[in-house]
Amino acid sequence: MKVKADDRLEQAREEFIAQWGAMGTQWGINRTMAQIHALLMTAAEPMSTDEVMEALEISRGNAHANLKELVAWGLLRVVVKKGERREYFEAEKDVWRIFTVVARERKRREIDPALEVVRKCAEESRGITTPEGRAFHEQMRQLEEFVEFASKMADRVAMMKHGFAIQMAAKLLG
Amino acid sequence: MKVKADDRLEQAREEFIAQWGAMGTQWGINRTMAQIHALLMTAAEPMSTDEVMEALEISRGNAHANLKELVAWGLLRVVVKKGERREYFEAEKDVWRIFTVVARERKRREIDPALEVVRKCAEESRGITTPEGRAFHEQMRQLEEFVEFASKMADRVAMMKHGFAIQMAAKLLG
DNA sequence: CTAAATTTTCAGAAATAATTGAAAACAATG
DNA sequence: CATTGTTTTCAATTATTTCTGAAAATTTAG
């Protein structure tokens, strides 16, 4: 009976890791990174680099790079066990926190650079008086206005506490 | 003077196309697709496949595939000029509409599949009574709950009219 | 300081994704 | 139905990203 429950768990967990990994691709983050995240999100204990390598059958370099990347995102924490030399990794498990971390990172990667581009182009096209020039400038201005708005919204959302978000959602969905 | 204004415009526009294209990569859509989108978003008139090919110096196959993809997203419309045989493409220029279209598409690609995965894993791990099994199931449940929430939010946002969004934002940002 | 354990780097290999160019399919015209 | 203009497909190529495995660097312990 014990064994059977463990089997079912192991199977469900492996499915989760595989699928979450495949989804990572769609998401624009690489498969290994998503798999490690899934692995650690469902791990009872923090895991070492070697344990991750073994569980996912990946090389040391790959494991290392992606563990570090996840730490940089803020989705993993480094843990040192007393009396142990190697470092262990532990995932953030609170889904709302995961979400805000990802929101922050995506804002930084997707919104901020867009804002810069669009600002520059709006600036460069200011004062062109041909009809085409005016239309272009106006388009850039509108884009700039929108991206600015998106930037501020992302900041707010990333800072929200779970409770507040739920409250707001209730209004929006109710 | 006319020439100078045209030059400035052409330069600003090319910068926009190049940068928006580069950003597409970050975004998870391919460079050409983002470039075509930028090109047409700032075009005074609808453009044909050949005009797009020439403007961006890309092959017919590439132009064709990405134009069709943009039409599938709903970011371009096909236009037929009377008495003309070939088809022209025209971009959606309203930034809010662009946003809602992209939101819908990303929801479909990123949120819906995640929901399926997480539901399946929550289902498969229901009733496992070991402590690890319970923890896993609980994690999947929380993820499911969150992704469901995100899904509903995305639907709402994608349906919002611009005015309503601004109103909501005022509350949130004010 | 030396040795062992561990982390980090990186050049090359493998896998994946994007692009070309030409041929095939299709549509309209006379 | 033959011709011409246009769209669509796709095998081969090229570019980009990811991964490996081993060596180098760093850290800790004795």
Image (cartoon, coloured by chain):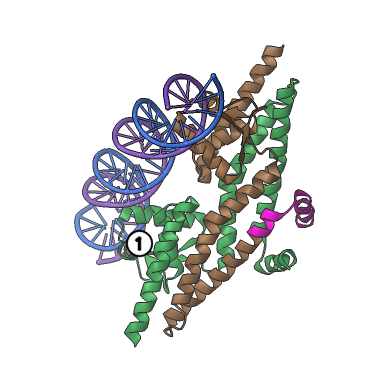
Chain colours: A brown, B green, C purple, D blue
Instruction: Name the image quarter holding the C terminus of chain B.
Output: bottom right
- The prevailing secondary structure element of the residues shown in magenta is helix
Type of the residue with mark 1: Thr
Q: Quadrant of residue A18?
A: top right
Residue sitting at the far bottom: B1
Q: Going 36% across and 73% down the picture, which residue do you hit?
A: B11
Describe residue C13's horizontal placement relative to residue C16 as left or right: left
Q: Residue at x 53, y 39 (%)?
A: A68
Q: Chain of mark 1?
A: B
Q: Which image quadrant for residue B124?
A: top right
> Which quarter of the image is occupied by the N terminus of chain B?
bottom left
Q: Position of residue A158 (x, y in %)?
A: 67, 54
Look at the image and give the residue range highlighted in magenta: A154-174
Identify the residue under disc 1.
B49
Which SS class for mark 1? helix
Q: Position of residue B63 (x, y in %)?
A: 36, 56
- Of residues C22 and A17, the one nearer the viewer is A17
Q: Residues within 10 Å of mark 1 (few under 14, many from 20)?
A: some
Position of residue B131 measured from the top left corner of the image (x, y, whole percent): 74, 23
